[in-house]
Image (cartoon, rainbow, N blue to C red):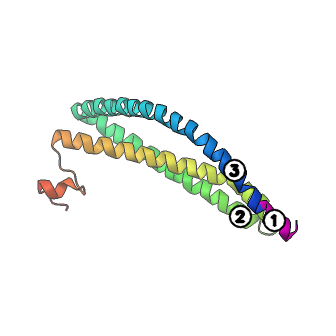
Amino acid sequence: MSEDSKFWLSILVPIPLGVAINLVTPWFRRQLGQSNAKFKERQLRKEKVEAAATEFFASNHSVFALYLIRHATATVIGLIGFIFSYAGAMFVVVAAREELGDVPRYLAQLPFQLISLFFLTVTFFRVRRMSRIWVAVRRREGWPLLHHKQDAKVGVSKE
């Protein structure tokens, strides 16, 4: 492709694309407006479930300990899965240095990258939920929140 054709193509392609985006924008706004109410409803339902879990765990400390152990184990397994899948992606890059071109090499490592992203995302949300419930149960029971912002207000030492 010549330089002139690249130039004209770079000028002509964005114009219809911009028009199409402007035509589709109102539809997306309507969809987001409808889903915003659904999102708030789903969030409220999720908060009720967490509040019920907090009440249950606060009254059953042994079950709470088992919950923490189970989620800590699943977190470690998720991190190990992330490490191995990321190592697989790096192996593909190293093993196929010059044999494959750039595009096939990156396409070959894409499944490993997606799997590692999946493991990392699941682990992140698991830890986030576990820590929210942990803090809620400790607050409800009046236990000190070690290494937490509330420690300074309550006067609990961080040792």
Q: Is label 1 in a helix, a strand or a loop?
A: helix
**In the image, residue 8 lies at what x, y percent?**
80, 63
Which one is earlier in the sequence, the residue at label 2 or at label 1?
1
Q: Are the residues tagged 1 and 3 within 8 Å (C-beta)?
A: no
The residue identified by callout 3 is 17
> Magenta stretch: dominant SS?
helix
The disc labelled 1 sits on which kind of residue? Lys
Query: What span is in magenta?
Result: 2-9
Figure check: 69 above or below 145? above
The residue identified by callout 1 is 6
The residue identified by callout 2 is 93
159 part of magenta stretch: no
Q: How far apart are marks 3 and 2 (CA)?
A: 35 Å
Q: Which residue is drawn at 70% across and 56% down?
A: 109
The disc labelled 2 sits on which kind of residue? Val
Which one is earlier in the sequence, the residue at label 3 or at label 2?
3
Mark yes or no: residue 101 visible.
no
Mark yes or no: residue 84 visible.
yes
The disc labelled 3 sits on which kind of residue? Leu
Q: In which quarter of the image is the C terminus?
A: bottom left
Crowd around label 2: few <14 · some 14–19 · many ≥20 (10 Å)? some
Q: Residue at x 84, y 70 (%)?
A: 3
Observer-nearest of 17 and 157: 17
Observer-nearest of 73 and 94: 94
Q: Are the residues tagged 2 and 1 within 8 Å (C-beta)?
A: no
Figure check: 88 above or below 130? below
Q: In which quarter of the image is the N terminus?
A: bottom right
Mark 3 or mark 2, whichever is nearer to me: 3
Name, please, the residue furthest toward the left. Answer: 155
